[in-house]
Amino acid sequence: MRFPLTRRAFAALALGACLAGGALAADAPRVKLATTAGNIVLELYPDKAPKTVANFLQYVGDKHYDGTTFHRVINGFMIQGGGYDPKMVEKPTRPPVAHEGRDAYAKGLRNQIGTVAMARTNDPDSATSQFFINVADNKFLDPTVKEYGYTVFGKVVEGMDVVNRIKAVPTGANDVPQTPVVITSATIVK
């Protein structure tokens, strides 16, 4: 008689754990990028890349992304934004955020289609405001024992059709869209 009760108790605990896991994902902050191509909603993971998410959210709160463009678009690779205005003038930034790529990778984040990562120079600790959305599975951007990789800190949860429209725009020199794709506003929606 005790065994069925124990199984029920175990099932209730397992269900509670599943619901709690869903609640954690439900609590993840979301940012809406309103663009001239449509809206994109990003879900961010502070539990996996806390400094990177805090950095991104501060730029959102400071309205830094408003009026910036997706200034580098490579179909089959990624779309990059967050640093330049439509005249390709770079916006000033705060000091770089510490690289968290290996930690985020160890917690399950990968440079896969629809994920969002920080852009940087060859210096792993150089990421400031620029980010990119992967439009392909870019495993070569993930950290390895020898390479730092790029810090993934979120994913597109709405508007992947918009991302796909952006990745297909005609580009010119340095992969800059011929017609600017502007982020008109970035707002925290949750």
Image: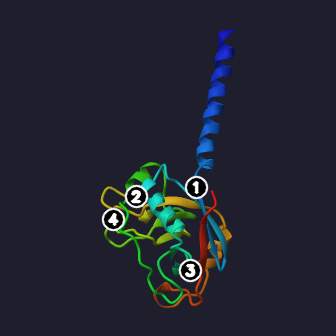
Mark 4 touches mark 2? (CB < 8 Å):
no
| Helix, strand or loop under label 4 | loop
Measured along the vertical axis of the image, is residue 99 above or below residue 132? above
| 34 to the left or right of 140 | right
| Helix, strand or loop under label 1 | loop
Q: Work out how far the residue at label 1 is from the one at label 4, CA to CA, in angstroms.
A: 24 Å
Q: Nearer the viewer, mark 1 or mark 2?
A: 1
Q: Where is residue 36 in the image (x, y as percent from the top left)?
A: 65, 80
Q: Residue furthest front?
A: 62
The three-letter amino acid code for the residue at tag 4 is: Asp
Q: Mark 2 points at which residue?
A: 101
Mark 3 touches mark 4? (CB < 8 Å):
no
Q: Position of residue 56 (x, y in %)?
A: 48, 64
Q: In the rendered view of the protein, which quadrant contains the C terminus?
A: bottom right
Of 149 and 85, nearer the camera is 85
| Helix, strand or loop under label 2 | helix
Q: What mark, if any, has residue 67 been given in the picture?
A: 3
Measured along the vertical axis of the image, is residue 45 above or below residue 37? above
State which tag comes first along the sequence, 4 or 2. 2
| 50 to the left or right of 115 | left
Q: Nearer the viewer, mark 4 or mark 2?
A: 4
State which tag comes first along the sequence, 1 or 2. 1
Q: What mark, if any, has residue 125 been given in the picture?
A: 4
State which tag comes first along the sequence, 3 or 4. 3
The three-letter amino acid code for the residue at tag 3 is: Gly
State which tag comes first along the sequence, 3 or 1. 1
Q: Image quarter for residue 120?
A: bottom left
Q: Name the residue under label 1.
A: 29
| 144 to the left or right of 12 | left
